[in-house]
Image (cartoon, grey):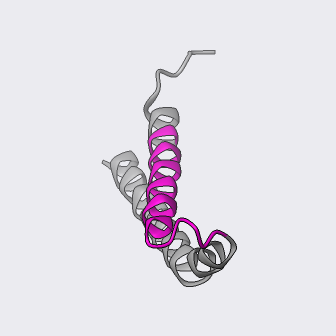
Amino acid sequence: MNSRVKVFGVIALLGFVAGIIAQVTATYFIPWFMSVLPLLGGATSFLISGFAGAVLTVAIVSVWAYMTGKKEPY
């Protein structure tokens, strides 16, 4: 039971960090990127959001896979 609570805590912490990253991306990076690449116009925010979502998903799944992987006995 204790290890399950730890896993839930780590997942909650990862979600919290993902939310902070998404907010920083939406506040600072997307407006800057739209000014750098005006040719993409409205599609820029969708491209960046998709990329950020993909990176966050891979990071969260990687942490989950590492934490739940088979442990080799020593």
- Give the mark count: 0
Q: Is residue 53 magenta?
A: yes
Residue 35 screen position, x and y as percent? 65, 79
Residue 16 in the image: state x and y as whole percent.
Answer: 46, 70
Q: Majority secondary structure of the magenta segment?
A: helix
Is the residue 47 above or below the residue 65 in the image?
A: below
Left/right placement of residue 7 relative to residue 62 reads: left
- Looking at the image, which residue is at 47% across and 26% down? 69
Residue extending farthest to the left is 1
Q: Quadrant of the C terminus?
A: top right
Q: Nearer the viewer, residue 8 or 59?
A: 59
Q: Residue furthest front?
A: 39
Q: 18 above or below 58?
A: below
Residue situated in front as seen by the camera: 17 or 10: 17
**x then y, percent, for residue 28:** 62, 82
Q: Which residues are magenta?
A: 37-62
Q: Residue visible at 36% across and 56% down?
A: 8
Left or right: 45 as drawn, with respect to 5: right
Is 1 in the magenta? no
Which residue is at 47% across, 21% downward? 70
Q: Locate residue 6, reporting x and y percent.
A: 42, 54
* 58 lies above or below 71: below
Write the residue at 53% across / 50% down.
55
The residue lying furthest to the right in this view is: 36
Left or right: 63 in relation to 38: left
